[in-house]
Amino acid sequence: MLTGVPLFLLQLVVILASAVLLGRLASRLGQPAIVGELAAGVLLGPAVLGQLAPGWAQWLPRPGSGALIDAVAQLGLLLLVGLTAAELDLGRLREQAGTLARVSAWALLLPLVLGAAAGFVVPAALLGPAADRVTFAAYLGVALSVTAIPVISRTLSDLRLLGHRVGQITLASGACQDSVAWILLAVVGAMATSGAGPETIGMPLLWLAVMLLAALVLRPLARRVLSVADPAPAMTMSAVVIITGALAAHLAGLEPVVGAFVAGLVAGAAKGAGARHLAGLRTAVIAVLAPVFLAFAGLHLDLAALAEPVVALTAAGLLALAVAGKLAGGYIGARTSGMPPWESFAIGAGLNSRGLIEIIVATVGLRLGILTPAAYSIVVLIAVATSLLAPPLLRAAFKRAPEQNGERHGRGASERDHPDLHRPGHR
């Protein structure tokens, strides 16, 4: 039996190769890559390989075992979150403040309230060992309110909607919502670890405010340090900034992913060559570390629990609330901003993608003891299902878009205003 470094290398090869192969297969079938990468973890886990070849399955890491591969997955998680924050265009958020405020508020608060309300009626058996009803309800509200910027961006790009105002507002609104969601996740994490008292919640919020202020102060310095022509220092320093932010958050009693997100705002200050190098780092993380994280997350999935009637009904109900909450929230926010009905529906459809961000939130919930394995599987199911639903919903919303855009812009409208309705979206 292999142990130590040889076992780690075997695990890394098997998990990474399986995740990449199945992710590519999912993309070829017009599905998000995360579906295939999660499926790799499921196939390698106790649900499939554990039943077919128990001896071989013992070589693969189990969640919570402290295996080296777990550390690699966590590194990928932190860099993904940080690089997602680094892509936020703070200037654009300020320019579209009015519309963004309405769309973001409705699309965040409606699913947040629906999720929190559902948390009080979900069967008690789905509550993790560290969660009371209030903590679980708060967590479920956050889980249903997040939006996956990477999934939205790729879906809009594949449908050629990034240049359309729907794409611009959807991405910017998703960024606003996720920024608030990370703050709320910090509060929920404090509630799970220290209770729901004013002091236990107030101190993490104070530290979070300090970190955000430090991020704003450090952005000009980071712009000079990271905007260099040499790719190696720029990429290395960006990773150091993100990991340092995660460490600072952990020491302050916050979730490391929250610190990684705040530090990503600092790393995102890079301009010119530095910004291109940051994109190169993101490509490397997406290509290598993200599949490891997603496949490792798939090892947590309890498919047997999803077959139980109570769990299946709960999953169906929460999925319906998640989809309806984002659709209605995005639609109402856009309509109150004066946008046409079909564009309003498209914004709600785009914001429904939860993908990678939801899986990160699910991983945090399981690690903190807020979720049971069955509840974790429900949240991951919502992440996958909403990512699958977003492209067809967007195509349905834009079936009349060329006609509408032609009326609005005339025959000389730019190609970017005419979406390609037939290209599939993935990651």
Image (cartoon, helix red, strand yellow):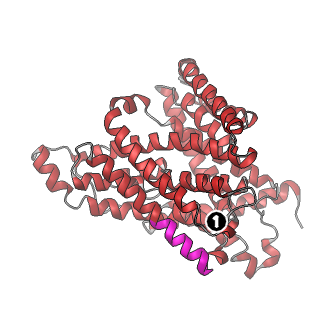
Q: Give percent across and percent down for residue 339.
A: 23, 46
Q: Quadrant of residue 249?
A: top right
Query: Is residue 151 placed above or below 230 in the rendered structure?
Result: below
Q: Give percent across and percent down for residue 315.
A: 55, 70
Kindly identify the residue that appears in the image at 59 percent across and 81 percent down: 309
Q: Is residue 412 left or right of residue 214?
A: left
* Of the pair 413 and 119, the residue shown nearer to us: 119
Q: Quadrant of the N terminus?
A: bottom right
Confirm whether the magenta stretch covers residue 313: yes
Q: Which residues are magenta?
A: 307-320
Q: Is residue 226 left or right of residue 90?
A: right
Q: Is residue 260 visible?
A: yes
* Of the pair 148 and 133, the residue shown nearer to us: 133
Q: Give percent across and percent down for residue 255.
A: 68, 42
Kindly identify the residue that appears in the image at 66 percent across and 60 percent down: 297
Kindly identify the residue that appears in the image at 74 percent across and 47 percent down: 193
Q: Which residue is mark 1?
A: 375
* Of the pair 324 and 291, the residue shown nearer to us: 324
Kindly identify the residue that appears in the image at 28 percent across and 43 percent down: 165
Q: Main secondary structure of the magenta part?
A: helix
Q: Name the amino acid type tagged 1.
A: Ala
Q: Give percent across and percent down for residue 353.
A: 45, 56
- The residue furthest front is 197
Q: Is residue 323 left or right of residue 42?
A: left
* Of the pair 371 and 293, the residue shown nearer to us: 371
